[in-house]
Amino acid sequence: MEKLIVPGLLDSLSQIAAYVMGAANQCGLDKKSTYKLRLAVDEIATNIILHGYQEAGRSGDIAVEADISDAKLVIVIEDTGEPYDPTEHHLPSESDLATTLDEREAGGLGIYLVLEGVDEFKYQYDGDHNRNIFTMYTHS
């Protein structure tokens, strides 16, 4: 699929979601996997916009590209926001997940959903941009 490039603004989240849904449909990903992938991509894109751009006082675009094959769908999101590796973030423990939202310390749940929701997730920082890579196997 052709790369999607959108401004790093919350208004762009619907375009990103539509792109991911289109790629998932094109490669024949099942509904449950499609939902998990869309949720994971939305979480990372939202964090890029809010933390990598807005809170850091930066602006820039978000590029989303799908690589579709018979065996898998790979979605790559690139941005020039503040460097941030989601895999180094503190993830909630089993006891954290068992507590109510009121009792739990804020943060980490979205990253947990990303890591648990996709078949593979990788982060790379390349010179001046973040690259978040999501892989879903089609299980065909």
Image: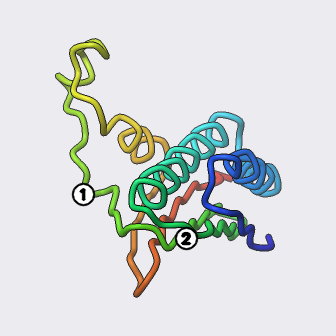
Q: Can residue 101 be seen in this view?
A: yes
Instruction: Specify how the rendered protein is coloured.
Output: rainbow
Q: What element carries label 2?
A: strand
Identify the residue at image location x=48%, y=55%.
54
Query: Quarter-wise, where is residue 85 in the image?
Result: bottom left
Residue 51 rendering spot, x and y as whole percentages: 41, 53
Outermost residue on the bottom side: it is 127
Cβ–Cβ below 8 Å for labels 2 and 1? Answer: no
Residue 82 rendering spot, x and y as whole percentages: 38, 67
Amino acid identity at mark 1? Glu
What residue would you read off at disc 1? 88
- Mark 1 surroundings within 10 Å by alpha-carbon count, few (fewer than 14), some (14 through 19), many (20 or more): few
- Mark 2 surroundings within 10 Å by alpha-carbon count, few (fewer than 14), some (14 through 19), many (20 or more): many
Image check: 38 left or right of 70?
Answer: left
Asked if 33 appears above or below 74 in the picture, the reply is: above
Give the mark, 2 or 1, whose residue is nearer the N terminus. 2
Q: Can residue 69 be seen in this view?
A: no
User: Where does the N terminus fall, quadrant-wise?
Assistant: bottom right
Outermost residue on the front side: it is 57
Identify the residue at image location x=48%, y=52%.
119
Residue 129 rendering spot, x and y as whole percentages: 46, 77
Asked if 102 appears above or below 74 in the picture, the reply is: above
- Please tell me which residue lies in front, 119 or 44: 44
What residue would you read off at disc 2? 78
Identify the residue at image location x=76%, y=51%.
15
- Please tell me which residue lies in front, 9 or 100: 9
Amino acid identity at mark 2? Glu
Image check: 116 left or right of 71?
Answer: left
Residue 78 rendering spot, x and y as whole percentages: 55, 70
Asked if 19 appears above or below 93 in the picture, the reply is: below
Query: Quarter-wise, where is residue 137 in the image?
Result: bottom right
